[in-house]
Amino acid sequence: MQIFVTGAAGFIGQATVKELLAHGHSVLGLARSDANAALITAAGGTPLRGDLKDLASLRRGAESADGVVHLAFIHDFTDFAGSCAADRAAVEVMGDALKGTGKPFVLASGTLTLPRGSLATEESEPERDRPPFSDRTISADLVYALAKEKGVRGMVVRFAPTVHAEGKGGLTRALIDIYHEKGGPVIYVGDGSPRWPACHRDDAAVLVRLALEKGDAGSTFHAVSEEGVSMKETMGMVGKGMKLPVVSQTVEEAMPALSIFAHLLASDNPTSSEKTRKELGWQPTRAGLIADFEANFPY
């Protein structure tokens, strides 16, 4: 199949392009710059110039492909609602291009919108009352509607908040970069018990390919290889790597240093991928979060 991939030059996108090409597919990758186009070309794909707000380019890409993987998202936390609105418009245009074809459309979403404090599964409904972050769940609803009503094999892959590889990727690396810039102490919230799931990006790329090849319309899959790594363990690893003290603070105390991340650190988000593994035969094999960062600490 020829697959149109948005975010093809991104962190997860590069691994996904490599995985698709290695299994006989061809890739048309959305490129918003010459540098991104060069990355896609070097990987063996074909770049299509455009971006998420260039709806005509998105339509061209979807119409010319045998399937779509939508990984790109505008990560502007100063206007997250606007980013979500742009994402919905992109999904609508690409979905319209695929309607009635039965072709696959894989949408990237996230686990942090799921109910907190208990193990979430693929059947769990997201929390829809936490704007602006819950706004992103509307894109997933659009894909489910494409599957149910428009003849598109639409599927949603919820990615763990840290998809990692070689000391890069996800919210854990974003926190490390904050401490590298501002210094310590490294903070966890409360007793550090909140858990985040994690997944190596190479394992996540395999999951995306398997969903494209054999996922059922309307399915939800979880790119989760570890159900939950505690914030105390994760921040302990960060502090050790940066040689900074690690302390407990309340959300309010952490806000000046971490801004919105303070609230995220308090989110207990354990997540299962049991159903995903059974339905797709997905078996993660790569290093876990702590082992990966300890072996490849970025600073």
Image: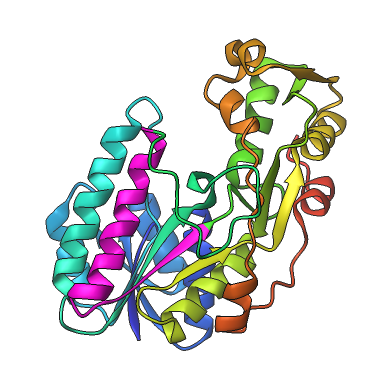
Q: Is residue 214 magenta?
A: no
Quarter of the view holding residue 78: top left
Q: In terms of depth relative to the viewer, which is nearer, 120 or 133?
A: 120
Quadrant of the snapshot with the C terminus: top right
x, y percent for residue 181 = 64, 20
Name the residue at 25% across, 74% down: 148
The answer to which of 295 and 285 lies nearer the viewer is: 285
Pinpoint residue 207: horizontal percent, then vertical percent.
Answer: 55, 73
Q: How is the image coloured?
A: rainbow
- At horizontal 33% and vertical 41% (from top left) the residue drawn is 135
Q: Specify whether residue 151 is painted magenta.
A: yes
Residue 261 visible in this rendered orientation of the protein: yes
- Name the image quarter holding residue 189: top right
Q: Residue at x 37, y 33 (%)?
A: 131
Residue 235 percent across, percent down from the top left? 78, 33
What predominant SS class does the magenta segment belong to?
helix
Q: Is residue 39 above or below residue 256?
A: below
Give 94 or 118, whichever is nearer the viewer: 118
Residue range corresponding to the magenta coloring: 131-158
- Horizontal side, residue 150 vs residue 34: left or right: left
